[in-house]
Every structure is written in C-alpha cells, then in structure tokens.
C-alpha cells in the first residue's frame, strides 16, 4: 500500500495529482519535454496545474526548470561538486516546481554538507530545517525527522504553515 502525504495545504475541491516523472530527469524539465515523455511512455497528455500553465506563468516555470536542468547537468551531475550558491538555487528551484521529496532531500543533504564545509552556518541551518521536514514527511509523517533528528535535541517538532507550505521545526533546548 502506498501512502501519500500532502506537503502543502489542500483546500476542499482542489485537485490532487501525482507526478509520474523522476525529479532528477524529465520531472524537472520544461513542459514540452514532460508532455512528450508522458505521451510516449504512458499514452496520455497531462493536465496537471504545471502542464496547464500558459503565457508569462509558463515562461517563468520553464525558465525555473531550465535553471534546474543546468545545475543538474553541470559538474557531470555530481551534487558534491556544485558550489554552495548553485546548490541553494537548485534546492529552491526544486521546491518551487514541487519536485518529489526524495530528490529534494538528496540535494538538501549535499547543500547541508557543502554549507558546513564552507562554514556558512545560516545556509546549514536552513538546509537542516528543510531536510528535517522532508525526512519527517518521507518517513510517514511521524514527525521524527529521521536521520536529521540526531543533529537536533529536543521534543517533537513544531509544524508551521508558511506561504501555504508546511514546515517542521525542531524544538531546540538551551
């Protein structure tokens, strides 16, 4: 049985869709590539919110996805070789396009490691909070933060909705 967990608020009547595409590959690509892939391999034309965008909204979405693809293909696709600024942009872009959490978590782990190596504590803290939230959701929504829980001490995390997205923040003890 597959469990689906919402990572943003869903209002009554909102359509819920599931991406068939891997976030590392076609799932991060521009609409025309995603549409062609789905038609070729699954035999349907997608009508999700992302695929129905048009005009300036489509141009902005495709530009975001081109940035993601550029970051993914640079340095032979090795996240550990990307500079901190590229990892931050990639992480933010993946969040904006609603990429699948396992890949976002992979990028987030590379971002956290790079930020710590470079001594950028603000970037490291932001990556840790994001990774903690994603791991808790991937782990079934139990709120334990998975492997990231060992990096923080305290009680169960606090769930906070910010801009329509739910974030988990670990409770730190002084």
Image (cartoon, rainbow, N blue to C red):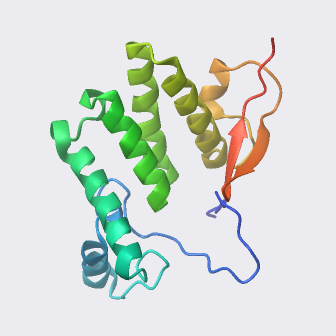
Q: Which corner quadrant holds the C terminus?
A: top right
Up/down of 86 relative to 40, above or below: above
Query: To which quarter of the image does residue 8 belong?
Result: bottom right
| Residue 96 against residue 127 in the figure, above or below | below
What percent of the width, then of the height, locates residue 165? 65, 55
Q: Nearer the viewer, residue 170 or 137?
A: 170
Q: Residue placed farthest to the front in the image? A: 56
Number of numbered discs overlaid on the protein picture: 0
Q: Position of residue 66 (x, y in %)?
A: 26, 59
Q: Is residue 124 left or right of residue 52?
A: right
Kindly identify the residue that appears in the image at 81 percent across and 32 percent down: 156
Q: Is residue 102 left or right of residue 68?
A: right
Along the viewing direction, whichever of 53 and 22 lies nearer the viewer:
53
Where is residue 166 shown, x and y percent of the image? Answer: 69, 51
Judge whether residue 99 can be spotted in this image: no
Q: Residue drawn 64% across and 64% down?
A: 1
* Residue in the picture at 55% in, 75% down: 17
Q: Quadrant of residue 172?
A: top right
Point out the residue furthest to the bottom here: 44
Describe residue 36's horizontal placement relative to residue 155 as left or right. Answer: left
Answer above or below: position of 30 versus 173: below
Of the pair 126 and 4, the residue shown nearer to us: 126
Residue 93 in the image, given as x and y percentages of width and height: 41, 51
| Quadrant of the rendered image containing residue 107 | top left
Q: Is residue 171 visible?
A: yes
């Amino acid at each position: 049985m597959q469990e689906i967990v919402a990572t943003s608020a869903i209002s009554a009547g909102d359509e819920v869709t599931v991406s068939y595409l891997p976030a590392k590959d076609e799932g991060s690509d521009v609409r025309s590539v995603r549409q062609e892939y789905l038609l070729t391999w699954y035999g349907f034309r997608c009508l999700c919110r992302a695929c129905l965008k048009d005009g300036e909204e489509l141009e902005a979405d495709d530009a975001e996805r081109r940035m993601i693809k550029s970051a993914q293909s640079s340095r032979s696709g090795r996240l550990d070789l990307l500079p901190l600024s590229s990892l931050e942009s990639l992480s933010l872009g993946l969040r904006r396009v609603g990429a699948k959490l396992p890949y976002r978590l992979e990028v987030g782990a590379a971002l956290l490691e790079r930020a710590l190596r470079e001594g950028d504590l603000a970037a490291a803290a932001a990556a840790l909070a994001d990774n903690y939230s994603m791991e808790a959701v991937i782990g079934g929504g139990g709120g334990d933060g998975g492997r990231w829980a060992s990096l923080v001490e305290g009680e169960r995390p606090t769930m906070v909705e910010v801009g329509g997205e739910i974030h988990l923040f670990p409770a730190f003890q002084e």
